[in-house]
Structures are given as C-alpha cells and as structure tokens.
Amino acid sequence: MDWESGEGLLSLDDPAEWDAALERGESRLGTAVIGLALNCPLEEVSPRIARALNLPDQGERGYAFTAAGTAARLNGRLTPELFAALRAEGPGGLAEDAINDTLTFVPFRDLPPWFKRRWVYMTVRGRLEYWWVSAGDALEEGWRALRGRQR
C-alpha cells in the first residue's frame, strides 16, 4: 500500500493496517476504508467506516460515505452504528448516495424506523413525480393534436 499516492488502497484487506494508518495520521483513510468495505466482513469494517465518517477532510469523509453505501450494496445490511451515522448526517449532504444505496439494497423489513419512513417518502415522491410528468406529457400531446386539426 502506498499511503502517499493512494495506490493499492482499494485492495486493503487488513483492518489493523487501517487502524495503524489512523494512528499515524495518514491522509487517505477514506479511500482505504472503501478497500476495507470491499474486502472485509461488515462487522470488522463497520467501526472503521464510522470513524472515517468523522474525518476532518471533507473529501475523505465523502469516500467514507461511499464505503458505507458499498457495505450496504455488498452485504444487503448495515450495522446499527452505520445506520445511526447515516441518519445523523441526513439526506441532502454527503450521505445522500449512501442513504439511497441503503434504501435500495437493504430489505425494507431490516431497515430501522427512520429509514422505513424515508423509503416510503422516496417511493411516494417518485410515484407522484412520475404521474406529474406523465400527465404533462399527455396534455402536451393532446395540445399538439388539437393544434394540428385546426390547420
């Protein structure tokens, strides 16, 4: 692993190496935690993702949220500490994609109450937006047909 350039960090599979890098104050911890999410069991990587979500560097925090979304995609579940961290950050910020990944890849029955409410909200909103666009398209098509007959 080259912590200076970031090369090889996505293949990181040793949580102890990430812990040592945190102690040394390395700068690419968010990138490395994605590697852990890809290569380690969720229970081992979850506390490290949670720590990386609080890194001072905004870019590395963004990568940590990517790692949380990756963990949801690969495992079909998250730990309570990751659910809590995503909820604390909330939608509309760095956690937006990780929340969407969680809502997509974690079964509804396994979601905590806040995520279930968010899932319902997103589903209803998506359906309403679809109907709104469909109605607008139908009206526009009808208007074009009516104008074509008037000529």
Image: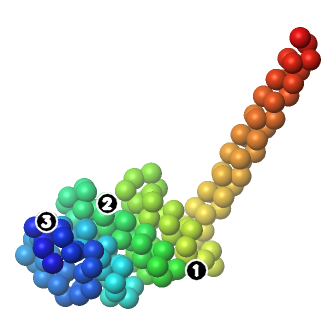
Please tell me whether mark 1 sits on a helix, a strand or a loop.
Answer: helix
Q: Position of residue 19 (x, y in %)?
A: 18, 82
Q: Is residue 46 left or right of residue 121?
A: left
Q: Dot 3, how many residues are within 10 Å of its Cα: few (below 14), some (14-19), or many (20+)?
A: few
The answer to whether residue 72 of the structure is visible from this angle is yes
Question: In the figure, 21 relative to 98: above or below?
Answer: below
Task: Report which residue position mark 3 lands on.
Answer: 5
Per the model, the C-alpha gap separating discs 1 and 2 is: 25 Å
* Residue 62: numbered disc: 2
Of the pair 62 and 80, the residue shown nearer to us:
62
Task: Report which residue position mark 1 lands on.
Answer: 110
Residue visible at 62% across and 74% down?
Answer: 108
Specify which label sits upstream in the sequence, 3 or 1.
Answer: 3
Q: Dot 1, how many residues are within 10 Å of its Cα: few (below 14), some (14-19), or many (20+)?
A: few
Residue visible at 85% across and 17% down?
Answer: 147
> What type is the residue that disc 1 sits on?
Asp
